[in-house]
Structures are given as structure tokens and as C-alpha cells.
Image: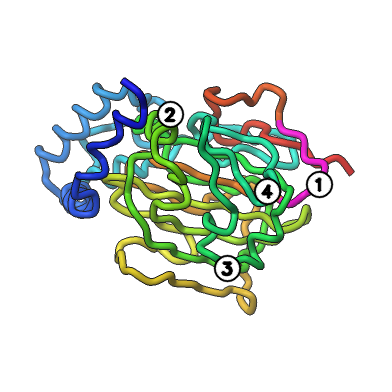
Amino acid sequence: MPDRLSVLPQYLLPKHALTAFAGVVASSRGGRLSTGLIRWFVARYGVDMSEAANPDIGSYASFNDFFTRALRPGARRLAGADLICPVDGAISQLGAIEGSRIFQAKGHHYTTTALVGGDAALAAMFEGGHFATLYLSPKDYHRIHMPCGGRLLRMIHVPGSLFSVNPATARGVPGLFARNERVVCVFESAHGPFVLVLVGATVVGSMATVWHGVVSPPRGAAVREWRYGEQDVNLAQGDEMGRFLLGSTVVLLFPKGSLQFNAAWQPGSAVRMGEKMADLPA
């Protein structure tokens, strides 16, 4: 079935209501019910609990506690690279930003301005730059880490739809990552500015950052923004910066320059947090 036809039911589903319900279920401390749900999820998606700091399924009080589990020490090592992969997942797309256009899938592009919530001045900083779109499946580790050291400048919550972000939906829904709800984090680094965007999706119960806590919910109709210019929010390479509940997507934007992505990085390839993403030759 063509991808555009396969995603048609998503236009009809009450995505926000389903997501709110999923959030209630995931946060509830249901005892044996929560443990049963976690056991089913681990078996259904093949979650590798040997990598978890706490591999005991029965010890998690809620599904949220399980889903945002920490990794055991040493489970991920940081590569000696200018930019490291911030998540476990798979590469959806990566490459050069064509003017202001980001490639989503065959026949689909969206603009940097749309992605960051309409701020043309912010988007202009990445014209002709580079992007990477990384998909986190349900089985993946769902904490997000810093690709390099950075100082937080701004955070923007952009309300939107909640389509699935799986590969078929990316091929079938125009402008997917710029129409779904998202949290745009703007950093300054030794290599220049960069943006890390957390993209929401169907049944993603919440998105949170380490400096703010839960950003969404609440889900309103207006863009919300926080500025941190006078605060000292600094994160080192590899530090946790945020987390998802259930699978979603991260989009990274870098300015124009000589960024060279890891040659092994190709669309569809699996990636792990801490591996080399790119170098920035002097």
C-alpha cells in the first residue's frame, strides 16, 4: 500500500486524546498491572534490559519509570569526535540544508523556519547548513544527550499535531517534523550555534528537559518561549539534556561550514548514543 494511503487513518484519529490517555496510563503506579505492561512491552519490542542500570522489571513503579530508565555505567562510551550521536535510534535523513529546505523523504521537504516555530532570524543562522534527523523506536533508550558541550540560550515549545514519526509516516505526511508538536532547544557551542529539536508523536506522553522538567504537557495553542541568556545553563558533551516517553524523533541543525558526517552514517542505519556523528575540521 502506498505510504500516503497507509497514513490516512492517522488524519482521522483523535491523536491528542489518545496521547493524553497514554500519558495517564504510563504515569499510573498500577502495581502488578504496570509490571505486566512492562513485561509485555519488553517482550513485544525486544528491549535489552541488560543495558539498564536497573534490569529488574518488577522494581519499576510505573511504565514511565521503566521507559526513561538510565543505562548502566559503561554501557555507552563517548567517541573522540567534535559531535557525537545524542541518542540510540536510526538515521532517518541527514545532509546539507538546501537554502532553508530540509529533506524529509522522497517528495517531501520542510523549512528551517517552520521547524523552529516561525522565527525567521533563528532559521537564517542555519541557511545552507547541515541537519540530521534521528528516529527513536519504542525499544530504544529514550534519554537524549548533548552532541557537544553547549550553553543554553533559548527553548521554544511549538504546539502542533501528533502524527506518528515512524519511517512510513515520514514518507507519507508532508512536513511531518514541522507540523508535529516539538521543543526547540537553541545552544551556543565552541563550534558555533546549534539547534536540537525534540519532536512529539502519537502517544508520546511527555517531553522533558533537565533544566526545566516536563515541557509538554500542558498542550496549548500558543507558542511558548523561555530565554536563558542571563542564566548559566551549561552542559558538557554526553550530558543528558532531555527525554521522551515512547518513541519519537530528534532533529539537529548546524550552521554552514565544513562539517563532515561519519562516513558510516546512512539513512536507515542504526546508531547509538556516544558514537561519532561528525567532525568539524579547523
Residue count near mark 2 (Cα–Cα under 10 Å), binned few <14, some 14–19, many ≥20: some
Quadrant where the C terminus lies? top right
Q: CA distance from mark 3 to mark 2?
A: 33 Å
Q: Which residue is mark 4?
A: 148
Question: What's the residue at 64%, 64% (across, down)?
Answer: 122
- Element type at mark 4: loop
* 246 relative to 89 in the view: left or right: left
Q: CB atoms at circles 1 and 4 under 8 Å apart?
A: no
Residue 14 placement, left or right of 257: left
Name the chief secondary structure element in magenta.
loop
Badge 4 crowding class, 10 Å Cα cut-off, few under 14, some 14 to 19, many 20 or more, is: many
Q: Nearer the viewer, residue 8 or 230?
A: 8
> Marks 1 and 3, how far apart in space?
22 Å
Q: Residues within 10 Å of mark 1 (few under 14, many from 20)?
A: some
Q: Amino acid at mark 3?
A: Arg
Sequence-first tag of 3 and 4:
4
Spatial distance from mark 3 to mark 4, Cα to Cα? 17 Å
- Specify how the rendered protein is coloured: rainbow
The residue that disc 1 covers is 257
Front position among marks 4 and 2: 4
